[in-house]
Amino acid sequence: MSASSFPLVLPKVQDTALETTKYENLLRALRNRRLNVARLDHTPLDITVDMCTACHLRCPYCATGSGVLDRKAQVLGLDEHRRILDFCGEQLFTIWYFSNGEPLLNKRLHQIVADAKRYGIFTVISTSLSVPLSATRIDEILYSGLDLISCSIDGPDAATYNRYRIGGDFNLVQSNLERLIARKRELGLQYPLIEWRYLVFRHNQDLQAETRHLAHAKGVDILELFQGSAPAQAPEGAVAAMTGGLLSPAISGPAVEAGLRRRDTLLRRYLPELSINPGEPGPGLLGRKCDWLYFGSMFYPDGSVGPCCVLGNSDTDFGQRGPGMDYRALWNNPKYLDARASFPTPPPNPRSICAHCPAPQVQDWFFRQSLRAYLLNAPEWFIQAVLAEPDQLFYPVDLYLMPDEFMALKRYQQAKPSVRQAGEPG
Ligand code: SF4
């Protein structure tokens, strides 16, 4: 899941006490990020946790599949996961349970997810689905409270699929997909949403329409077409980058259509409309800060913590939980302080890996969809707090990247004369 459907499908936090805790934390996070505070008095709100650091497929441009990743193969245990929840569970909106491995290889996945659901957290896995699943396992997954299963299937037939998903079993994947959808319907469950994710490369770019037809016929909730990362000049026979465009719209399906019509939260009722793709970041807007350092963090099964999912190897970790070092201390340790101090003033702090970020284009971008979703679901007190001091909470780039949400805020303010008038985010 690339998160572009996230603002459409994320539900409001149901428990009022947890909602208050999460939004109070978000308010502190926005203020700390806007003021470039290095030592934070908030905790992460949206984290990535590797359910497993191994995978049995050999996808050529994946660090794990290609054998580039130096990390030991491990599965996340219940105790380590509970320590993460002890640190920030009440404040978290979302956990993405995947980065460097196949989540279904963790047999405790359903128990881990069930633990997170007690904190009102939206939970997501991304899987190849190329793992044998018994009827019992399917029920465990469906009953766990998992909110979204994103299934990576880059072709409508086995030959196309296996060009990239080397070692994957297309027939097994299709069978699992059909069984998950059928059982979910039988149980009358709304969640998990089931997404078919199709990475588009040169070899499969002409099959997008056929795949869309097949995916919708099978009854998936979301189909996402996403540009696969590959060299433009790949050697003969290797997977190469696409040359055409993505079929429009890039995300489709009943959950997307329902999401576009949603008016079930206060700010959504003030939306003129909700676009799928917000404004793209332009030159000069990037590199001012990194939202990963304020909103998220990357947790590994052995207690290691990295700043983001862009970096994968253990030598880029910011620390490891252990005796005398808990997750709360790691969140403000010297490496984090150095990294946050790397922005926004050049020259960046050369001691930090973030000063040499391998993917600076994500810095203003990665959390944008999450932020949109949290704003759209916000309670009224939070919206009023935002309107009271927008320039203390947002950068101009936020206004540019979230035009629908800021338009809705403006319309709400105009309709509520009691709300103090405030200027545009500065
Ligand atoms: S600046 Fe780059 S390396 Fe550092 S946390 Fe952000 S994305 Fe990761």
Image (cartoon, rainbow, N blue to C red):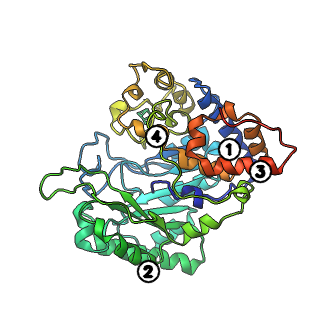
The amino acid type, in three-letter code, at marker 1 is Lys
Q: Residue 192 sits in which quadrant? A: bottom right
Nearest to N terminus: mark 3 or mark 2: 2
Q: Residues within 10 Å of mark 3 (few under 14, many from 20)?
A: many
Depth check, front residue: 108 or 338? 338
Depth check, front residue: 397 or 34? 397
Quadrant where the N terminus is found in the figure: bottom left
Residue 108 visible at all: no
Nearer to us of marks 3 and 1 is 3
Nearer to us of marks 2 and 1 is 2
**Discs 4, 3 touching: Cβ within 8 Å:** no
> Is residue 198 found left or right of 400 in the rendered image?
left
Total labels: the figure holds 4
Residue tagged 4: 282
Nearest to N terminus: mark 4 or mark 1: 1
**Mark number, residue 412:** 3
Residue tagged 2: 217
**Discs 3, 1 touching: Cβ within 8 Å:** no
Q: CA distance from mark 4 to mark 1?
A: 31 Å
Q: CA distance from mark 3 to mark 1?
A: 22 Å
Residue tagged 1: 22
| Residue sticking out furthest to the right | 418
